[in-house]
Image (tube, coloured by chain):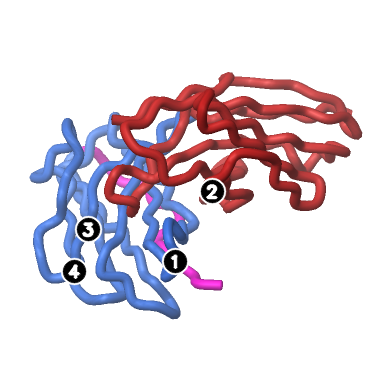
């Protein structure tokens, strides 16, 4: 089946620094990708929809200037957490729609810890 | 919009059967998904129901009642490796991304 990768799988950074997370569709093209955030023992919450060649669409309450999304190609979307704070520590998961109706492929996730 | 509810935690014994319920309220309906998620990993697909009734797939079965806005995931012959979170999810109105329920953390005890 289709594979979505994320890099890095784990990252620790200091407060005030920026961190970039990559999401790649390995064997298919994705004009749209989704970024989710998951706090411990909580469910996945959609942050934004990444669109190749255009601006990302952010969910209500998500700061677009803090969570920068760039969909540089049909196989790569990046999420940059700028000026990270400890409250940004979370599990970030991306997904991409498959060819089947309502089909979704999830990346393995990135554990971000801000100290 | 969509509203999804699940029990937060459940505990069961190895070899037993457990039923995880999910109730939903949606402005439109494009089917309901169940995902399994182990801690620190991405969700993995378990089932998709769009019509009423029971769909059986090995040890896992999923049931849907559209009139009641209700689904359940049935796990038989529980194994220790089934300890995980189980998420029900529905596609949003545009059918591309998902709205996830809060997830049910299942602990399987020996």
Residue drawn at the location 80% of the way across and 51% of the way down: B58
Query: What is the residue that sits farthest to the bottom in this orientation?
Result: A27
Secondary structure under the numbered disc 4 in the rendered image: loop
Q: Distance from label 1 to label 2 (Cα)?
A: 13 Å
Compared with B49, A5 (above or below) is: below
Answer yes or no: are tags 2 and 3 on the same subunit: no
Other-residue count near label 2 (Cα within 10 Å), few / some / many at <14 / 14–19 / ≥20: many
Chain colored red: B
| Residue A112: numbered disc | none
Secondary structure under the numbered disc 3 in the rendered image: strand
Answer yes or no: are tags 4 and 1 on the same subunit: yes
Residue B35 position by quadrant: top right
Compared with A47, B11 (above or below) is: above
Chain letter of mark 4 equals A
Secondary structure under the numbered disc 1 in the rendered image: strand
Other-residue count near label 3 (Cα within 10 Å), few / some / many at <14 / 14–19 / ≥20: many
Left or right of A110? Residue A75 is: left
Residue that carries the numbered disc 1 in the rendered image: A5
> In the figure, what tint was chain A given?
blue
| Residue A52: numbered disc | 4
Residue A8 visible? The answer is yes
Q: Distance from label 2 to label 3 (Cα)?
A: 20 Å
Percent x, y of residue A83: 15, 42
Residue range highlighted in magenta: A1-15
Circles 4 and 3 in contact, beta carbons < 8 Å: yes
Percent x, y of residue A72: 19, 72
Residue A41 visible? The answer is no
Residue drawn at the location 46% of the way across and 60% of the way down: A103
Residue A66 position by quadrant: top left
Compared with A66, A102 (above or below) is: below
| Residue A50: numbered disc | 3
Residue that carries the numbered disc 2 in the rendered image: B43
């Amino acid at each position: 089946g289709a594979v979505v990768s994320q890099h890095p799988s784990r990252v620790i950074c200091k407060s005030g620094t920026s961190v970039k997370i990559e999401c790649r569709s390995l064997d298919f093209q994705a004009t749209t990708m989704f970024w989710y955030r998951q706090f411990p023992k909580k469910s996945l919450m959609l942050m934004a929809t990444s669109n190749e060649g255009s601006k990302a669409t952010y969910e209500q309450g998500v700061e677009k200037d803090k969570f920068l999304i760039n969909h540089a190609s049909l196989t790569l979307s990046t999420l940059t957490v700028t000026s990270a704070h400890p409250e940004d520590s979370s599990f970030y998961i991306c997904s991409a729609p498959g060819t089947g109706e309502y089909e979704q492929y999830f990346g393995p996730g990135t554990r971000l810890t801000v100290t | 919009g969509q509203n999804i509810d699940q029990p937060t935690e459940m505990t069961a014994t190895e070899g037993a059967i457990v039923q995880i319920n999910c109730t939903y309220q949606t402005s439109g309906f494009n089917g309901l998904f169940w995902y399994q998620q182990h801690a620190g990993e991405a969700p993995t697909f378990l089932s998709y129901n769009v019509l009423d009734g029971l769909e059986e797939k090995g040890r896992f079965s999923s049931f849907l009642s559209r009139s009641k806005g209700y689904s359940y995931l049935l796990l038989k012959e529980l194994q220790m490796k089934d300890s995980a979170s189980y998420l029900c999810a529905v596609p949003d109105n545009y059918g591309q991304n998902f709205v996830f329920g809060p997830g049910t953390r299942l602990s399987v005890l020996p």
